[in-house]
């Protein structure tokens, strides 16, 4: 009886995984052919998950199920695929034979047409969508003060694949023996619009109040070009360059206000090291056009990883800092902050 059930189960498994792909080295992969796109056939196997086999490594395929096929000249056929050992295949009840280089798309009869899916994805990419992130910070600092503190940051973006608006608001406060030693507020906005394959133009403005640095108001505006130098699936690098205007009003009455035209130079870097870990970095330097020795340098480098599979909760841990070549009296040029931020993403 057990042997009978074993044989019956064996044949049921063969029936469930009845599609085959034969490679040039003679290997035979059994499973469920999901489709073909971009020169690769996808097959779901019971032992190795979903595999993507380049057409150049395939000698023949077969399937007991009805598949839809589109050739490079946009003709469409439906039917069950028969093996032909000479590198071609045919559809049952049809006389025409095909080779894989002739095939543009192959998909299951119950699945959506890849052309329709592509059109839907392109239309989706044009839609401007809101994405928000609320972060709670545990911060530490060194430079003008050595302390631990708390902070909050709100980021919002309204963007699609080609242009976007980004807004942020952050507040950090640190107390030492009930005395405020840091009370920093920042607000900013940026617009980015791509007009060429690798080029965008951008406009941005930042406002800052930092009682620790004795800065009553620091305002920076910039307009320029962004060059998307590298855009791979796992990492991206972009360079910024433009004209800027920097205004700085000191909280010390004896200090003169700064009011200078400047240059905005920046580097943006992101790298998905693993599915669950990414590295992000942003570096900006703003030298004065009147005196290049007067500049403000700011940077933020962090690792980001999700807390849940849905990626609604993220943790960002990084190091942020500024270097002001002309600080007010009694203040240091360097102000460094390390932080751990718990972020909730919502749309």
Image (cartoon, rainbow, N blue to C red):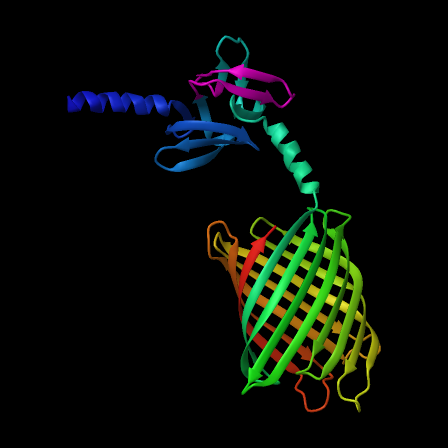
> Eyeballing the image, is 230 above or below 335?
above
* Left or right position of 255 against 187: right
> Eyeballing the image, is 148 above or below 223?
below
Q: Where is residue 193 shown, x and y percent of the image?
A: 76, 51
> Eyeballing the image, is 302 above or below 212?
above
Magenta stretch contains residue 81: yes
Q: Where is residue 195 shown, x and y percent of the image?
A: 78, 48
Q: Which residues are magenta?
A: 62-88
Q: Residue at x 74, y 84 (%)?
A: 326
Q: Residue furthest left?
A: 1
The residue lying toward the viewer, choosing from 42 and 182, is 182
Indicate the quadrant containing the N terminus: top left, top right, bottom left or bottom right.
Answer: top left
Say if residue 23 shows up in the picture.
Answer: no
Q: Residue at x 43, y 20 (%)?
A: 63
* Left or right position of 205 against 27: right
Q: Residue at x 80, y 73 (%)?
A: 246
> Eyeballing the image, is 155 above or below 336?
above
Q: How many labels were placed on the picture?
A: 0
Magenta stretch contains residue 59: no
């Amino acid at each position: 009886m057990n042997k009978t059930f074993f044989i019956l189960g064996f044949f049921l498994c063969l029936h469930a995984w009845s599609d085959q792909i034969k490679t040039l080295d003679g290997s035979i992969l059994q499973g469920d052919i999901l489709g073909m796109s971009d020169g690769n056939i996808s097959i779901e196997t019971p032992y190795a998950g979903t595999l993507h086999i380049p057409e150049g490594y395939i000698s023949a395929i077969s399937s007991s199920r009805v598949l839809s096929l589109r050739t490079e000249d946009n003709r469409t056929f439906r039917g069950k695929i028969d093996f032909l050992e000479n590198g071609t295949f045919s559809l049952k009840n049809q006389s025409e034979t095909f080779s894989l280089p002739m095939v543009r798309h192959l998909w299951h009869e119950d699945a959506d047409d890849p052309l329709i899916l592509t059109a839907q994805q392109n239309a989706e990419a044009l839609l401007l969508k809101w994405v928000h992130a609320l972060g709670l910070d545990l911060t530490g600092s060194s430079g003008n003060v050595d302390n631990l503190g708390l902070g909050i940051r709100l980021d919002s973006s309204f963007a699609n694949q080609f242009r976007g608006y980004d807004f942020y608001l952050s507040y950090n406060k640190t107390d030492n023996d009930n005395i405020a030693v840091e009370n920093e507020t920042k607000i900013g906005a940026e617009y980015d619009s791509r007009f060429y394959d690798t080029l965008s133009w951008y406009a941005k403005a930042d406002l800052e109040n930092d009682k620790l640095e004795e800065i009553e108001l620091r305002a920076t505006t910039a307009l320029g070009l962004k060059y998307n130098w590298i855009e791979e699936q796992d990492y991206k690098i972009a360079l910024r360059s433009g004209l800027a205007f920097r205004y700085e009003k000191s909280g010390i009455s004896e200090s003169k206000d700064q009011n200078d035209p400047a240059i905005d130079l920046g580097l943006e870097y992101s790298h998905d090291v693993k599915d669950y870990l990414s590295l992000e970095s942003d570096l900006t330097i703003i030298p004065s056009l009147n005196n290049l020795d007067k500049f403000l340098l700011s940077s933020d480098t962090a690792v980001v990883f999700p807390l849940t599979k849905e990626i609604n909760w993220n943790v960002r841990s990084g190091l942020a800092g500024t270097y002001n070549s002309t600080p007010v009296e009694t203040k240091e040029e360097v102000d460094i902050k390390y932080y751990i931020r718990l972020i909730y993403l919502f749309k």
